Image: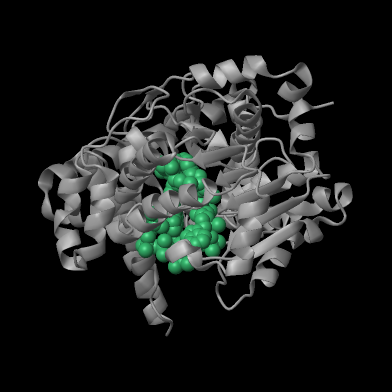
Amino acid sequence: MSMIAAFYGGKSILITGATGFMGKVLMEKLFRTSPDLKVVYILVRPKQGQTLQQRVFQILDSKLFEKVKEVCPNVHEKIRAISADLNQNDFAISKEDMKELLSHTNIIFHCAATVRFDDHLRHAVQLNVTATQQLLLMASQMPKLEAFIHISTAFSNCNLKHIDEVVYPCPVEPKKIIDSMEWLDDAIIDEITPKLIGDWPNTYTYTKALGEVVVQQEGGNLNIAIIRPSIMGATWQEPFPGWVDNLNGPSGLIIAAGKGFLRSIRATPMAVADLIPADTVVNLTLAVGWYTAVHRPKSTLVYHCTSGNLNPCNWGKMGLQVLATFEKIPFERAFRRPNADFTTNNITTHYWNAVSHRAPAIIYDFYLRLTGRKPRMTKLMNRLLRTLSMLEYFVNRSWEWSTYNTEMLMSELSPEDQRVFNFDVRQLNWLEYIENYVLGVKKYLLKEDMAGIPEAKQHLKRLRNIHYLFNTALFLIAWRLLIARSQVARNVWFFIVSFCYKFLSYFRASSTLNV
Ligand SMILES: CCCCCCCCCCCCCCCCCCCCCC(=O)SCCNC(=O)CCNC(=O)[C@H](O)C(C)(C)COP(=O)(O)OP(=O)(O)OC[C@H]1O[C@@H](n2cnc3c(N)ncnc32)[C@H](O)[C@@H]1OP(=O)(O)O
Ligand SMILES: NC(=O)C1=CN([C@@H]2O[C@H](COP(=O)(O)OP(=O)(O)OC[C@H]3O[C@@H](n4cnc5c(N)ncnc54)[C@H](OP(=O)(O)O)[C@@H]3O)[C@@H](O)[C@H]2O)C=CC1
């Protein structure tokens, strides 16, 4: 019997960010392995005209929860959605709901965050720092609380090269930042943001670092642990390989590459691609929840959930495997044939952006205009290039994350728990994982049918022929222009033609002799 699964039995668990990518995988695993848990409280905000209940039903209706519904048929009764907005005071939770949460919660998993790299500093601070502070305050009033697990990111200290499993201080105290956000106006915040974030690349990583400091400073006597996942990708094994439901991290770029929009990227092929499957993160998170509650470590332990130091893969290898998978499993209605040019140089980046991205978009928009349709490709391409520029920082550097605590935890688990809550990334076969990831993107993000693969392959063949035809026409036009202007080019042309003629005559004569 799994000790971890048994631990969660009968427990009341509070999850923030349960409607997000990680939150859903976390909930799924919890219900599948501990169907006898008492209740899962999730803090949800109404969104896109959907009520809380509609949002919960939409999650439970997804393929991700198919197995759960077999193991725990009354799962919908065990999820208690609480209306909350983490941007508001006391999260805008009603008095009754608050009372229930405070008196029953045993474990908190704090996953909610804004993960947008370019979020306004005020908003990023509100969600990633102030909300964490408020949640800690709530936690301190929960008499039955056994553990508070805070999800951070391995990139919260990406301004360092080697990162240990410790909380690093920030140049400006989080409390001062929180205070200043209350009275500074947006224009001033915009002005001071670059100075405040210093050598962090964006407001996301900076505010996640501040959030960790808040957890350490204001955790009081709570049993707290911090988990730092690197780049979370599709699931590796559970509940099935390749599940993914948003465009963050590599997923959006895999779509852009598979559809032929993205054909070159400014990335260092040898830089470590520190991806980590979402189910691995969730397994570690649940194991940490158990360990923190049962063993009550004296200080706040930080756990790195990364792959680079145990089983490294690099961006070059990843790009090649993604392309190889497109050969087998192409995406439908691609704009161009998928291709991957990795460049680290400024000039070649501009060149490839002009030739591989902007020029085809302009030509296609011209074609759309000619056929009376609205041009849209240039706009899409500009957005893609903007996204690429934001991700560049992460694909041109490598970091070293130490994993002592994570490895210590692994050794503390029983063989059964090591199997059920496997977070040993050394067992991951990258080629297989990436292939399943691409397949998952096709199935669960693009919602494309596998039956369409032969047609998609035909489409790619047509694109290849158009490509050859286009290049040949371009070459002939360029050549024609050149020989019209240059005597040297004309001489070369006559030399090639007469050489070919002689070769053919010789070939014809020798084949006549052979007969
Ligand atoms: C050469 C070929 C290659 C071949 C092979 C290629 C595969 C192999 C190579 C793979 C290298 C991977 C590198 C990953 C590095 C990640 C490092 C993470 C480190 C930290 C990890 C963490 O700890 S934490 C999670 C990370 N946090 C994000 O990853 C959020 C990012 N994101 C945003 O910060 C905002 O999104 C941003 C972008 C500002 C736009 O902002 P914005 O306002 O302009 O646009 P919106 O967000 O409103 O989106 C507008 C439209 O862009 C669509 N879209 C949104 N994201 C998209 C995306 N990533 N790729 C495509 N498309 C995306 C969206 O679906 C909309 O499409 P539509 O309009 O059609 O609905
Ligand atoms: N994805 C990744 O690659 C990585 C993620 N992480 C961390 O993991 C955690 C989960 O990330 P992930 O699942 O990818 O993120 P998502 O963006 O998928 O999910 C974010 C969650 O936070 C909720 N949320 C945001 N704002 C509010 C608000 N004002 N009130 C209530 N809820 C809110 C969202 O709710 P709603 O559905 O209503 O928007 C959603 O449930 C985050 O802490 C992130 O920093 C760490 C490393 C890598």
Residue that protrudes farthest toward the bottom in the picture:
372
Figure quadrant of residue 9: top right
Percent position of residue 377, x then y: 39, 68
Establish if 235 lies above or below 184: above
Q: Residue at x 81, y 55 (%)?
A: 75
Establish if 194 lies above or below 231: below
Establish if 306 lies above or below 76: above
The C terminus sits in image quarter: top right
Instruction: Decide if residue 441 is in sight here.
Output: no
Percent position of residue 147, x then y: 59, 37
Figure quadrant of residue 489: top left
- Colouring method of the image: one colour
| Number of marks in picture | 0
Q: Residue at x 54, y 33 (%)?
A: 223
- 99 vs 497, left or right, is right
Q: Nearer the viewer, residue 195 or 271?
A: 195
Percent position of residue 291, x then y: 63, 26
- 29 vs 159, left or right, is right
Instruction: Decide if residue 399 is in sight here.
Output: yes
The N terminus sits in image quarter: top right
- 456 vs 229, left or right, is right
Q: Nearer the viewer, residue 332 or 185?
A: 185
Percent position of residue 388, x then y: 35, 50
Q: Nearer the viewer, residue 305 or 137?
A: 137
Q: Residue at x 44, y 37 (%)?
A: 220
Q: Nearer the viewer, residue 103 or 487?
A: 103
